[in-house]
Amino acid sequence: MTESKNSQKLYIETYGCQMNVSDSEIVVSILEDKGYTITEDINEADTILVNTCSIRENAEQRVWGRLDVFKQIKKKKPELIVGVIGCMAERLKEKLLEEEKVVDLVVGPDAYRDLPNLLDTTQSGQKAINVLLSKEETYADISPVRLDKNKISAFVSIMRGCNNMCTYCIVPYVRGAERSRDPETIVKEVEELQAKGYKEVTLLGQNVDSYNWDKGVENKSIKFSQLLEMVAKVSPKLRVRFSTSHPKDMSDDVLYTMAMYNNICNHIHLPAQSGSTNVLEKMKRKYTREWYIDRINAINKILPNCAVSTDIMTGFPGETDEDHKETLSLMEFVKYDIAYMFKYSERPKTYASRHLKDDIPESVKSTRLTEIIDLQIKLSAESKKADLGKTFEVLVEGVSKKSTEHLYGRTSQNKVVVFPKNNYQIGDYVFVEIIDCTSATLIGEIATK
Ligand code: 5AD
Ligand code: SF4
């Protein structure tokens, strides 16, 4: 560690999924070990890192916009180092250095351990890049520096990469092959979080249901349901969530484990993408509409109080009006509490970009997306209304933005509840009775029981 590095101030900005948020915490841990200090003031930074997403074109557009802003800052401060890390770094590689003069450093998601060396290189005025993907890297031994504000809820990465090769998806190209993290290191990280006062962990992976730790010892492989149980046993007062489940792999074992432990939250994010078997086949999702419905029926049977959220994509190549209607009817059937809804965006390298014409006109994509969003607003409102009169245990996360006399928190189902503060504090568990709601929020009062 050199003297000059000790005083380096790092500003990091994160786009994309929860996995990227978790990765930024690993990056900060690696760099703090080398003497960097984190700053929240961009104007004070010696190094700016932007952790990027490539999932849709507009995710990348936002980052290009930010690079323009960094360019202005660098004009006034030529010694500033700007690094692009994460999925967009992996996708565009040297092109980022060539096309965008402001960028000094490009680092892909599996090369973060090399960041201190690469930053040393940039400090001597050269550009630096490492976009090697790895079959093994899980950053298992690194203790992430938590960047969340409330110190209540933390992400814990349990696996990296993806082997699914859905035809629209860029993730396998930018995050490499799937690999699971040593469960002992996961449990240790969770225990440390609990000891620090955290009340909730979310286990993260692109497809948590295919988590599989196999050290080669016969009968010793650990599946997701077993990992979930190991984590749930850390403390009954520590809530456990996970994301993302894949409908083709989501087993009853996981549902039964959820039913056994009160602290495993009753919420499953189960991206459907489409309600049409024809479209699902073209997406190579490896399940049908009927299979998806069977999984929903299993959830409702084994976990009657479980909320389900989803991702829906509209305008995939060849999607007909009939297919679109099937998506709407699936949404009505499941009654999702929350849905993340997107227009199909063609991504370079994917099977769809090479073999399927992006043939749904923009205007049709927009109309279909509007119909999907309108339906979801109705379903979200209905799901909240169904909670009126019920009492939930709520984990307090913060003070309401609208009133300092109110707190907000989440139910096990991941629904946000606002309620009077009384003497409660962030991190407390409070029983709240629901007395009113909007389409996004439950409104409650302290339960008297
Ligand atoms: N275009 C639009 N949406 C996409 N998603 C993934 N790839 C694309 C794409 N090419 C959506 C899926 C996925 C979520 C994370 O992003 O719905 O579940
Ligand atoms: Fe996350 Fe995928 Fe975006 Fe990468 S491309 S940040 S894995 S959503």
Image: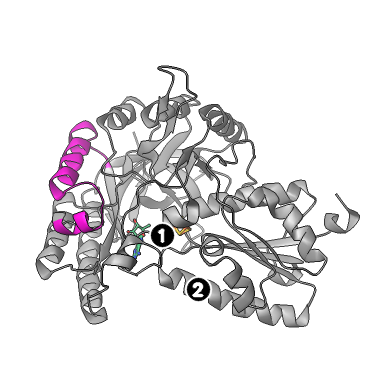
Ligand 1 - quadrant of the structure image: bottom left
Query: From what the image shows, is residue 365 above or below residue 163?
Result: below
Determine the CA span between mark 1 and mark 2. Answer: 17 Å
Magenta stretch secondary structure, dominant: helix
Q: Residue at x 57, y 33 (%)?
A: 194
Magenta residues, start to end = 278-306
- Is residue 148 in view? no
Kindly give the residue lying farthest to the front in the view shown.
355
The local secondary structure at tag 1 comes to loop
The local secondary structure at tag 2 comes to helix
**Three-letter code, disc 1:** Ile
Name the spot of residue 59 as percent of width and height, x first.
Answer: 45, 69
Q: Which residue is mark 1?
A: 170
Ligand 2 has an atom within 8 Å of the beta carbon of the residue at disc 1: yes
Q: Residue at x 29, y 61 (%)?
A: 438
Q: Residue at x 24, y 74 (%)?
A: 365
**Three-letter code, disc 2:** Arg
- Callouts 1 and 2 close, C-beta under 8 Å: no
Was residue 296 drawn as part of the magenta stretch in this picture?
A: yes
